[in-house]
Every structure is written in structure tokens, then in C-alpha cells.
Image (cartoon, helix red, strand yellow):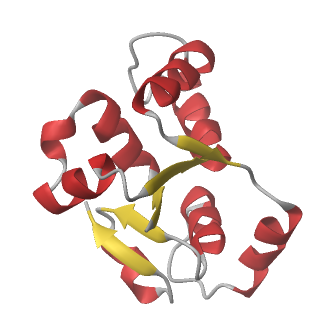
Amino acid sequence: MRLLLDTHVLLWALAEPERLSPLATAALVSPQNAVLVSAVSAWEIAIKQSLNKIELPGPAETWLPAAIEQTGFGWLDIRPTDALRVRGLPWHHRDPFDRMLVAQAGDDFTLVTHDKSFDAYAVTVLPA
């Protein structure tokens, strides 16, 4: 299975893994699954840290890449087709970062999230 992490799930996995459901934890550690983090999550984390809305162990630009490498998660770039796919999404959710995750998930990924608003989209969701 190919998993795409919502930003809060990424932060929980890195700093507060006890917040994840047993199902999500098992999926993230399973060697049968590819776990990916979207570049949009890095962008969201950088913005939130610059606004003092989240506290991280270090600057996002150094801490996050090192943490991702340590976990073995991979990165998912934002392609122009992903950005353009957002236009066609229904407005169930107004958060631009979450809308990009939905566009990227499409049929290729299972989106790991605790956010119930993703259920309104035509994506596969794994509850975090």
C-alpha cells in the first residue's frame, strides 16, 4: 500500500507516536507499505513554525528533512498536474494544504489522517 501522510499525522509520527491509532501505527511501520510525505506538508510546517503556531525541536528546514530520513519515509513532489487537479475538487474543505493532499492522493495513495473532512472526497482514507 502507498500511504500519504496528512501533516498532523506526520508530526504525530515524528514527535508524538502515541497519538496514532494502532491501525495507523501498524501501517506506518509495515515494510510492505511505502510511506510518503508531500512537499506541501513541508511548506505547511515551515509556515506554521514561522508564525509560531507549532514548536519543533529545531528549524523546520534542518529538522524536518533529517527526521524524514531517519524514519525512512519518502518525499512526494508537487507536480503541475497535482496543482491543476485542485481546481476540480469539490469545496468540502477550504484548507489549501489539505486540498493539495487530496489532489495528490487521487487513486494512487491511501491518505492517513485524523481529519473527518477528507471522508467527503473520493480518496481512500486510513484513520490516524
Up the image or down, 25 lies above or below 83; here it is above
Which image quadrant for residue 60? top right
Figure quadrant of residue 113: bottom left
As displayed, is residue 50 above or below residue 20? above
Q: Residue furthest front?
A: 32
Residue 35 is situated, as x and y percent measured from the top left of the image, at 46, 51
> Which residue is at the front of the view, 117 or 75?
75
Q: Position of residue 30 (x, y in %)?
A: 30, 52
Question: Residue reaching furthest right?
Answer: 80
Quadrant of the image containing the C terminus: bottom left
Residue 103 placement, left or right of 48: right
Q: Is 42 situated above or below 26?
A: above
Q: Residue at x 44, y 23 (%)?
A: 70
Closer to the camera in the image, 125 or 35: 35
Q: Please state the horizontal and vertical placement of residue 31, each as a whole percent of the image.
A: 35, 50
Identity of the residue drawn at 84% across and 71% down: 81
Which residue occupies 20% across, 37% down? 17
**31 or 94: nearer the viewer:** 31
Which of the image's four quarters has the N terminus? bottom left
State the residue at coordinates (39%, 12%).
57
Is 43 left or right of 63, judged from the image as shown?
Answer: right
Query: Image quadrant of residue 99?
Result: bottom right
Count how many numbered circles sit on residues in the image: 0
- Please say if 23 is above or below 103: above
Indicate the position of residue 36 as horizontal and vertical percent values.
53, 50
